[in-house]
Each structure stands twice: as structure tokens, then as C-alpha cells.
């Protein structure tokens, strides 16, 4: 968490400096819009209890992961860009396991997140048409999941897990290449690391007609390999 706060503080500071410098120098700029799709490779999520029984801990592994986003940006000068991004990340749950208790998991649901980011990107021209870029962003994400039902035949329990309605801090780092295929139209490919802060998950355990609730916490982190199209106005 300390690393996330340091990165967010740095990016926020850089954003203020760039915004001030752009108005002071009054250099020519331009708007652009971009669309991107990405293959996601999400890391294992661990659901850990906030208090309560230590056995209430699970691991989620994913498959069929993807992301889509759109951005509206402004070019400050030939090197720097600022943009606002809206995105959607979907992870299908491949398996849910526990190291401490036997569980039967058959829901096969999805965990997904909607997010919005403020990004800072730097361009480095390699040729007249090919440009490398790198940067990062900070913002908020709203994680969600399909309702998940677990059963433990040995204990005669059923457990229902849902992500609570909440918004959490999110950040990313990115880098890639863009190619000007036509005038004002760029094709690009990039790599992005995306991370959310911890969010809460509500668990309801029912045994012999008696229900008990407790809270777990987890986060989402993904490696994204994307391709997209950018149009400069």
C-alpha cells in the first residue's frame, strides 16, 4: 500500500507541473480519442478474512480475461499527453480453492471492474511514423462479481460471497508503440500493469439454519496486452 501511495503522489505532482507548464508556454496542442481492446492475464486473487475464522480464506484463479477502454486526450506538446480513460475488466473464475477447508465450487462466475483513470503519457519519436510511449495513471475502480455459492458437505455449510458496493483507488503503468498508418490515425500496441487497492467482500455462512456474516478483503491486479486505434482531431 505504501508503494501505491508513493506512485499516486508522484503522478499527481507531475500532472500539476505539466498542467502549469502547458499554460505558461502556450504551445500548440490537440485533442484525440482512442479505443483499445486487451487480453488480460490476471494474477491469483486471495480472499482473506478481516477478523473471524482463519479458515475463511480462498484463492481465485482466472481464465477468459479481457479488457476494453476508451480515452479522450489532449496533447500538450510534441512529447507529453494528458488523457481521461474509461475502462472495463472482466475475469472469468476458473477455480476457487482453499488450503484449509474442503469446498465445492460450481458457480463459475465472473469478477469484473469498471474504472476511470487520469493518465500522463510521454512520446518518443523513433521515425516519422513510429513512436514509443510510456506513462501511468491514477483513478478509481468499482469491482463487482457474480454471486458465488460455496458448499461444504463435511460441515453441512453453504457460503454466499458478494463484493460490497464500493469504489476503490486504482493505478496503472503502461508503455508501447504507435504507428501513424494514415494522416491523424494511429495504430498502437501496449503493455499495461493494472492494480486496485483492497476492497471488501461480504460472506454469509449458513449451517443448521443459522446464518453468520463476516467480511473478507481482496484486490485485482492484471497484466494487459492491448491493441488500439487513436484519432487526432
Image (tube, rainbow, N blue to C red):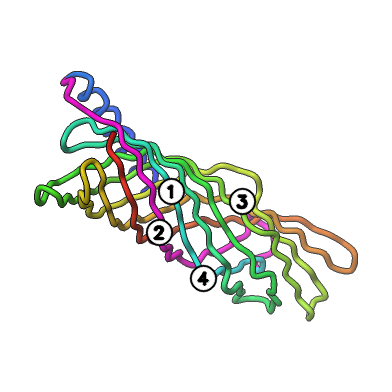
Q: Label 2 to label 3, Cα distance in Å?
A: 26 Å
Is residue 195 toward the left or the right of residue 150 in the image? left
Q: Which mark is residue 22?
A: none
What residue lies at 58% left-to-right and 68% top-to-bottom?
A: 93
Identify the residue position indicated by label 1 in the image: 69
Q: Is residue 105 above or below residue 196?
A: below
Contact, mark 2 vs mark 4 (Cβ under 8 Å) = no
Callout 3: helix, strand or loop? strand
Is residue 65 toward the left or the right of residue 225 in the image? right
Q: Label 1 to label 3, Cα distance in Å?
A: 25 Å
Q: Which mark is residue 38?
A: 2
Q: Position of residue 77 (x, y in %)?
A: 18, 32
Mark 2 or mark 3: name the one nearer the start of the chain. Answer: 2
Corner quadrant of residue 5: top left
Of residues 212 and 32, the one nearer the viewer is 32
What residue lies at 29% left-to-right and 57% top-to-bottom?
A: 189
Which quarter of the rendered picture does the C terminus lie within? top left
Confirm whether the magenta stretch covers residue 41.
yes
Q: Label 1 to label 4, Cα distance in Å?
A: 20 Å
Q: Residues within 10 Å of mark 2 (few under 14, many from 20)?
A: many
Q: Residues within 10 Å of mark 3 (few under 14, many from 20)?
A: many
Callout 2: helix, strand or loop? strand
Q: Nearer the viewer, mark 4 or mark 3?
A: 4
Identify the residue position indicated by label 3 in the image: 200
Q: Position of residue 125 (x, y in %)?
A: 12, 47
Q: Which residues are magenta?
A: 25-54
Identify the residue position indicated by label 4 in the image: 63
Mark 1 or mark 4: name the one nearer the start of the chain. Answer: 4
Confirm whether the magenta stretch covers residue 27.
yes
Amino acid at each position: 500500500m505504501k508503494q501505491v501511495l508513493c506512485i499516486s503522489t508522484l503522478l499527481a505532482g507531475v500532472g500539476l507541473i505539466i498542467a502549469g507548464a502547458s499554460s505558461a508556454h502556450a504551445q500548440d496542442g490537440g485533442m484525440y480519442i482512442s479505443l483499445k481492446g486487451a487480453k488480460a492475464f490476471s494474477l491469483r486473487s486471495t480472499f482473506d478474512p478481516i477478523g473471524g475464522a482463519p479458515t475463511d480464506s480462498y484463492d481465485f484463479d482466472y481464465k477468459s480475461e479481457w479488457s476494453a477502454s476508451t480515452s479522450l486526450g489532449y496533447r500538450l506538446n510534441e512529447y507529453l499527453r494528458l488523457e481521461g480513460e474509461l475502462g472495463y475488466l472482466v475475469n472469468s473464475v476458473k477455480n476457487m480453492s482453499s488450503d484449509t477447508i474442503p469446498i465445492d465450487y460450481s458457480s463459475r462466475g465472473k469478477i469484473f471492474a469498471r474504472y476511470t483513470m487520469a493518465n500522463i503519457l510521454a512520446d518518443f519519436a523513433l521515425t516519422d511514423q513510429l513512436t514509443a510511449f510510456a506513462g501511468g495513471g491514477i483513478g478509481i475502480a468499482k469491482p463487482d462479481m457474480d454471486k458465488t455459492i460455496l458448499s461444504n458437505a463435511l460441515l453441512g455449510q453453504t457460503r454466499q460471497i458478494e463484493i460490497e458496493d464500493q469504489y476503490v483507488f486504482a493505478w496503472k503503468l503502461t508503455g508501447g508503440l504507435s504507428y501513424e498508418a494514415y494522416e491523424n490515425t494511429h495504430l498502437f500496441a501496449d503493455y499495461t500493469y493494472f492494480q486496485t487497492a483492497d476492497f471488501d467482500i461480504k460472506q454469509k455462512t449458513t449451517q443448521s439454519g443459522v446464518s453468520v456474516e463476516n467480511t473478507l478483503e481482496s484486490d485485482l491486479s492484471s497484466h494487459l496486452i492491448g491493441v488500439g486505434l487513436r484519432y487526432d482531431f
